[in-house]
Amino acid sequence: MRKAWLSHAAVAILLIATASVPLPWLVIREGLQWRFAFPGWQGTTFTIRWMHSVEKEDWEEWFRVTDDDAIEITGTRFKTFGAGVPSDAGTETLLEDGWVVMTGIDREVDPLAVQAATEEHYRLIFAGHTIALSQDDPPPILTFSIIRVPLWQALPALLRPWLS
């Protein structure tokens, strides 16, 4: 009986601690509303992919959470150079399977704002899963940032991508 009581108490303490200790979350907001939340530990990576409005080719930008809970762009890849595209960025630019790949950018972009237009098919790639970001017009402006809050506060936005 005592062993069962101790097990139940340990589970209860663990649940209370998990629900009340602030944890880092990658939060995607539309205005003040949390649209999505994902674990945002230091070193967490994610990709934003969209179709360039003129080139009609997919582009990707790669991001990482820094030790200071900021978001930085680490690299990008695209098929063709267009207006406004730098000829080089970061420490390395190369051609890989028909993609121009620029790595070593490592520039803070926190908070990260994205206008997720429907025509450009904005998608978030996180932990191997692709989540649509675009919605009907007018295109939402999404803000990505790292926020430290308890699990209970992030839970609705954390579950949303898996329930939709």
Image: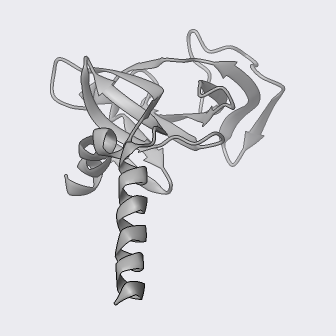
Q: Can you tell which quarter of the image residue 78 is in?
A: top right
Residue 82: % across, % down: 57, 17
Q: In this view, does 16 lie above or below 103?
A: below
Task: Name the outermost residue toward the top.
Answer: 84
Where the N terminus falls, by quadrant?
Answer: bottom left
At horizontal 35% and vertical 79% (from top left) the residue drawn is 5
Looking at the picture, does residue 82 appear above or below residue 44? above
Q: Which residue is drawn at 63% across and 25% down?
A: 72
Q: Between residue 156 and residue 132, name the one nearer to us.
A: 156
Q: Quadrant of residue 8?
A: bottom left
Say left or right for 58 vs 30: right
Q: Which residue is drawn at 17% across and 17% down?
A: 138
Furthest toward the front, the residue is 2
x and y percent of residue 124 in the render?
A: 42, 41
Residue 9 visible in rendering: yes
Between 3 and 107, the one lying in front of the other is 3
User: What is the total number of numbered labels drawn onto the structure image?
Assistant: 0
Q: In which quarter of the image is residue 10?
A: bottom left
User: Furthest-right residue in view?
Assistant: 91
Residue pictured at 28% horizontal, 49% vertical: 161
The way the protein has been coloured in the rendering is one colour
Return the x and y of residue 141 as percentages of the image width and height: 31, 18
Answer left or right for 161 relative to 25: left
